Image: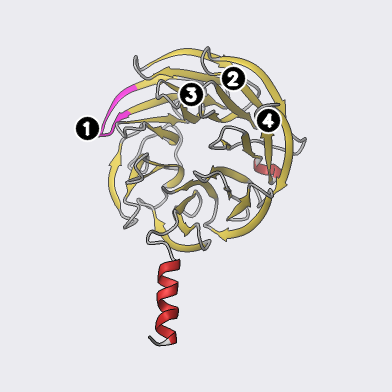
């Protein structure tokens, strides 16, 4: 067998049959979604959202990885238009396959693990909208705090936390009853919530407070707060898959803070791009990604070394980031 044939075969057998996961970045100002390969850190596609002027922000993959959901909203206040919706993309073709009514100005949302319901925060309406995915129908509109933004689903699917940045509250939705069953106060301008993998704790960022609130997610009670660096303006938050670390995107602080779960102490603060907003971690916990809205890029962090190892160009106003399956 010729040498060049052996070389080709060696490359084929050394390469995985399935590609590394793709990552998806919503670009609020550009009105696009940037898609890149996490193995090569190269952009593979840019998808323009419709209609023109729609702002893509919240983003999530379904548990089976077969759909990418993106929250769109218009620029109007307290008015609903065709731009206000949640769209589903096929992650293989990057084409829109369905569009859902999720109320006025949906910003962030969660989809249940069985893919049956969407829970959306309607920022300009002070509501949380529940959408039946199969029927493509709104089945509940629940009053929550003022200017709701963050939405988080507990690992067992029982609770949805909705943060409201003006009332400084977190509303607790019982997904069985489709009712708000509790509300508690946190530090000023809560942005995002995330649950621990075991569902016993939740963590809420407070942009103006400069803190991370630790919540007893069984009884929905605030336990304590973790003070972040003075420059931090915390927004996005994610918990590592093993439940040992919390990563906070510090917005206009241009950094990511790392918190040890066991001690609830700040252990590191890492410089990244300008205005990191969205944040995501790979399923193996080895890579962390931030969507940076002023530098219009994505920072890639090696969680073992806590170093930025790559910067990937995105669109104007990079907002959210989600990693594929």
| Residue 208 circle label | 4
> Which image quadrant for residue 62?
top left
Q: Nearer the viewer, mark 3 or mark 4?
A: 3
Residue at the limit of the structure toward the right, as seen here: 230
Which of the two labelled residues, at mark 3 and mark 4, occupies the earlier sequence position?
3
Mark 1 or mark 3, earlier in chain: 1
Going from the N terminus, do you reach mark 4 or mark 2 first? 4
Frontmost residue, 57 versus 205: 205
Number of callouts: 4
Badge 4 element: loop
> Mark 2 highlights which residue?
215
Q: Residue furthest front?
A: 1
| Residue that carries the numbered disc 1 in the rendered image | 135
Disc 4 packing (10 Å; few <14; some 14–19; many ≥20):
some
Q: Which residues are magenta?
A: 131-140
- Indicate yes or no whether the magenta region holds residue 124: no
Q: Is residue 204 above or below residue 143?
A: below
Contact, mark 1 vs mark 4 (Cβ under 8 Å): no
Gap in angstroms between the C-alphas marked 3 and 4: 19 Å
- Residue at point 42%, 35% (across, down): 106
Question: Residue 226, position in %: x, y?
Answer: 70, 26
Earlier sequence position, callout 2 versus callout 3: 3
* Label 3 crowd bin: few (<14), some (14–19), many (20+), radius 10 Å: many
Are circles 2 and 3 on residues that touch, CB within 8 Å?
no
């Amino acid at each position: 067998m010729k040498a060049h044939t052996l070389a080709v075969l060696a490359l084929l057998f050394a390469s995985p049959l399935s590609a590394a996961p793709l990552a998806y970045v919503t670009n609020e100002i550009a009105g696009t979604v940037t898609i890149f390969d996490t193995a090569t850190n190269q952009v593979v596609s840019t998808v323009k959202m419709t209609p023109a002027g729609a702002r893509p922000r919240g983003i999530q993959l379904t548990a089976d990885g077969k759909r990418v959901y993106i929250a769109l909203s218009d620029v109007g206040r307290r008015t609903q238009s065709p731009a206000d919706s949640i769209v589903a993309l096929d992650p293989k073709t990057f084409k829109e396959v369905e569009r859902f009514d999720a109320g006025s100005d949906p910003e962030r949302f969660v989809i249940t693990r069985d893919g049956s319901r969407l829970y959306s925060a309607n920022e300009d309406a002070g509501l949380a909208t529940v959408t039946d995915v199969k029927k493509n129908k709104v089945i509940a509109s629940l009053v929550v705090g003022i200017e709701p933004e963050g939405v988080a689903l507990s690992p067992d699917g029982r609770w949805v936390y909705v943060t409201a940045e003006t009332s400084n509250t977190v509303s607790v939705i019982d997904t069985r009853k489709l009712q708000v069953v509790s509300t508690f106060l946190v530090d000023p301008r809560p942005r995002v919530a995330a649950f621990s993998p075991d569902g016993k704790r939740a963590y809420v960022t407070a942009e103006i407070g400069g803190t991370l609130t630790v919540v007893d997610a069984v009884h929905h009670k605030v336990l304590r707060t973790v003070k972040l660096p003075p420059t931090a303006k915390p927004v996005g938050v994610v918990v590592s898959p093993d439940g040992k670390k919390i990563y906070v995107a510090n917005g206009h602080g241009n950094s990511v803070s790392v918190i040890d779960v066991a001690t609830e102490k700040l252990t590191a603060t890492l410089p990244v791009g300008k205005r990191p907003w969205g944040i995501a971690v790979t399923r193996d916990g080895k890579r962390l990604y931030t969507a940076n809205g002023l530098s219009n890029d994505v920072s890639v962090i090696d969680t073992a070394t806590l170093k930025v190892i790559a910067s990937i160009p995105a669109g104007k106003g990079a907002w959210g980031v989600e990693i594929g399956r």
